Image: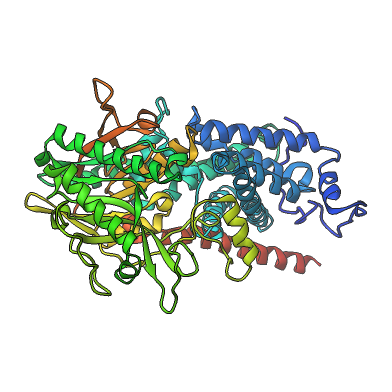
Amino acid sequence: MSDDLPMPSPDADADSGTSGARKRAPRPKGNPFTRLLGAYFHEGAFGYLGFLCIGLALDLLALPPGPLPFLILIADVPFLVILFFQDGKRWKRWAWMYGMLHFGFALRWLGEIHPVQVVGAAMVLGPVYLLLGAAIRWAVRARAPFVLAVGTAVVAEEFVRTFWMGGMPWPSRSLSFASGIPFDLGLSWLLPAASWFGAYAFSFLAGMTSAVVYTGLRLPDQLPEEGSRRRLLLAALQPVGVLLVLLGLAASGHAYLQSGQSEKPETEAALVAIQADIPQSLKHGKEGDTKEMFDRHLSLSATAVRTLGAKKVLAILWPETMVPYPFLGSALAHRFPDFWEGQVGVLRRLKDDVPEAQHLPWLLGVIHKFERPGQSHWNLWVDEAYGTHDSLFLLDPSKGPDMDEPMPMPPPAGESPPWEIARHDKTKLVPGGEYTPLGEVIPPLRWFRNFVSVIPELDPGAEDQAPFEIQDGDRTIKMGTIICFEIAFPARCRAWRRSGAQVLLNAANYGWFGETGFRWQVAGLARLRAAELGVTVVMAGNTGPTAFYGPRGETYGRFRDPAEPEDRAAGPIETTHRRGYAYAPLRVDREGMTLYTQWGDWPWLLPVLVVLLAGILRRNKRSQIEGASG
């Protein structure tokens, strides 16, 4: 084992790894760009570069759709090496580069929208790894338990990233535990443990096992040292203990979720999720293209109802923004009669084209435009004049007008048309895609966002929306809506569960990202949310994935392509860029809430406090000893 791979030294200086005064090298000459490049040309640079490449390789193999998800258990080892390589003299620049490339590779599917999106995400998220490195090095200098400190710092890094990105924690280590790919070597069976401590439990485990492996890299050099075997054994027992606890939690999680199974674990009728495979070029095309988009969804809905039978259908779900005509608030409906006619036309088509389903609940992804107080404009699509929600409407077509009936008048201000039963608005918006952070303060930021994104500026919905209520025989099924990337926000999903939702509907337009590994990652998020909350998650993706995930994170449901003779399983690969519909009953088999639903992420403050307290106490003790000896 090379001597260039030292164990972390508690005596290492914060920046150079040497005790005492730090000698600064002369600042290189030239402009900032050349100085930045020059910082990566130095003695030992190839060593840093090698560890960086190993880390990227581990990420590619471990994160979905990587073929070896179990490698996530050692994926942080190269980063730990970089922190202490050559006594950590240049750890900051290489930790920043590590973070940049890590997120650039993990989020490379953003390039399907615009290459600048990948660069921007890497630039914004890269510094988070600087904070991670600083936290680990502080714990080492403070003589806190190294293995516990790394696991805790990893969880804290994901928390910080969540805050940094406005709540979006993607990508994260826990995705490898929910990859769902064949031959995942058993990691997915741990999913029920998420019902106790959430997805962060898996990230905590991955951080600790990486710390143990890093510790073991210096085993030959450490054995002769007095007491080193005992320290190494104690360090190794920590993650082993955590692993045993997680195995126990997984087994008890299965039993815990199973204990809430009712006599009728599934709905009598099947929810139908339409996937019309609409490319973005058609979705944002001219009027004829938008008509084709609507007709395709309507035709598939009619085929599904007539094939399955109207009595066997619980509800019909369309993905996000698949109705090409906006639904207007009552005040705007009076101001823009043409758009009001388009809104009424949607209901008329539902009744006329699928008369068998006119009494069924329809869940349609639609843009909702509303009036902001004191503002008006002749153009409905001026962002500053009118608000825009990304919404899912619950509609009853039977209460809408027939084709031969006269056009109804818009409802009075503040009221909804009789066919609009309820509406859910997206609350968690993607920074840089659906809204511009600090855009009102710094106008050029909004111009740049508009340059890289064709999505209009959206308004967040209210946090306290009530679940949809849909009847299944004598039972009432309560459903919450997580639109598109809201599935990456654990807190939003928990809020729906706490409000009584038994099912989460992920209505989404994932057509932006092509046939990339993104689909495996978003499917992993769905499995994590289902297992965390003990609910069914229904994914309705425009181009896939369209699938059902039961309360233990299990995949189920069938997908029917009318052009094929047989149905296929619904899943990330099976449904990608196919035209058809997925159908399955809803598994509503848990009356109470899981412990994670009740606790949330608060228990993770405990290991953070333990590490901080241990570090502070040991630093104080060391200072007292040094003071006494001096």
Residue 47 occupies quadrant? top right
* Nearer-the-camera pick, 251 or 11: 251
Locate residue 133, reporting x and y percent.
66, 51
Between residue 127 and residue 486, name the one nearer to us.
Answer: 486
Image quadrant where one finds the N terminus: top right
Whether residue 554 is visible here, answered yes or no, is yes
Q: Quadrant of residue 312?
A: top left
Q: Could you say where residue 356 lies in the image, as x and y percent from the top left?
A: 11, 42
Is 435 displayed left or right of 374 in the figure?
right
Residue 328, given in percent of the width and then of the height, sits at 33, 63
Outermost left residue: 474
User: Which residue, as the protein is rendered here, is positioned at the far top?
Assistant: 565
Q: Where's the C terminus, which quadrant?
A: bottom right
**In the figure, is residue 403 to the left or right of 157?**
left
Residue at x-position 33% and y-position 59% = 339
Q: Quadrant of residue 416?
A: bottom left
Asked which colour scheme the image uses, the reply is rainbow
Which residue of the protein is positioned furthest toward the bottom in this rendering? 374
Q: How many marks?
A: 0
- Asked if residue 593 can be seen in this view, the reply is no
Residue 201 left/right relative to 78: left
Q: Is residue 9 above or below residue 458?
A: above
Rendered position, 250 above or below 579: below
251 lies above or below 391: above
Counting from the top left corner in percent of width and height, residue 29 is at: 93, 52
